[in-house]
Image (cartoon, grey):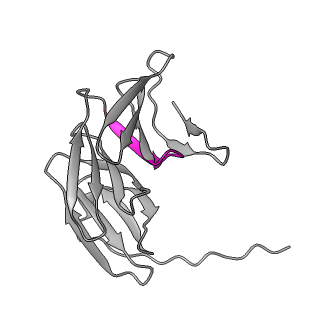
């Protein structure tokens, strides 16, 4: 059995220091990715057309996920926030109840909420669509959780 060769297309970004980080399929049929170096969320079509949403300076968005509300949600690694961006570019940032937690990755959960890792706070967080946040401390000291996803079993899985 032969393995098909992938087709690779590249799209140049306006600033090599923009720091592309996480990417996800959006609810609008495009792809959305974070730019941690210049604090932006960028939308790209499969044809390569791009637009971006500027976030507050110091946000450093990391992980990004499409939410159950048809918006994009991101982890603000340097701002102790989780943010929400509508497909039309409207932005809301929700402060987290911990300083220096380093929210890094985020995923849609099975419960109509978003779940995220707090790498330096040794916790997993849950944010409801109304911005209500709840933290869940981990039992392992200095676990340093990073990646998180909702498994096919409906449970949240993370690596530390």
Image-based side of 17 in relation to 108, left or right:
left
| Residue at the extreme right | 1
Q: Is residue 74 above or below residue 133?
A: below
| Residue at the extreme bottom | 47
* Corner quadrant of residue 50: bottom left
Q: Is residue 70 above or below residue 103?
A: below
Q: Is residue 51 magenta?
A: no
Q: Residue at x 43, y 68 (%)?
A: 27
Q: Residue at x 34, y 48 (%)?
A: 129
Q: What count of labels does the image hold? A: 0
Give how far across and how far down residue 137 sits, in percent: 43, 21
Q: Residue at x 39, y 59 (%)?
A: 69
Q: Nearer the viewer, residue 123 or 131?
A: 131
Give how far across and how far down residue 68 sits, in percent: 44, 57
| Residue 48 seen in the figure | yes
Q: Nearer the viewer, residue 12 or 93?
A: 93
Give how far across and how far down residue 121 sits, in percent: 35, 24
| Residue 38 seen in the figure | no
Give how far across and how far down residue 37 sits, in percent: 24, 53
Q: Is residue 41 above or below residue 82?
A: below
Quadrant housing the N terminus: bottom right
Q: Which residues are magenta?
A: 102-112
């Amino acid at each position: 059995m032969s393995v098909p060769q992938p087709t690779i297309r590249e799209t140049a970004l306006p600033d090599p220091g923009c720091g592309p980080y996480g990417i996800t399929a959006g609810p609008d049929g495009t792809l959305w990715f974070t730019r941690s170096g210049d604090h932006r969320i960028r939308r790209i079509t499969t044809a390569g057309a791009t637009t971006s949403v500027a976030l507050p300076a110091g946000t450093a968005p990391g992980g990004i996920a499409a939410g159950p509300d048809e918006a994009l949600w991101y982890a603000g690694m340097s701002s102790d926030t989780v943010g929400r961006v509508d497909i039309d570019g409207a932005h809301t940032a929700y402060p987290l109840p911990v300083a220096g937690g380093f929210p890094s990755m985020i995923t849609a959960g099975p419960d109509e909420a978003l779940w995220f890792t707090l790498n330096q706070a040794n916790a997993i967080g849950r944010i409801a669509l109304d911005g209500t946040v709840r933290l869940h401390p981990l039992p392992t000291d200095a676990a340093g959780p990073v990646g998180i996803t909702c498994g096919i079993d409906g449970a949240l899985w993370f690596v530390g």
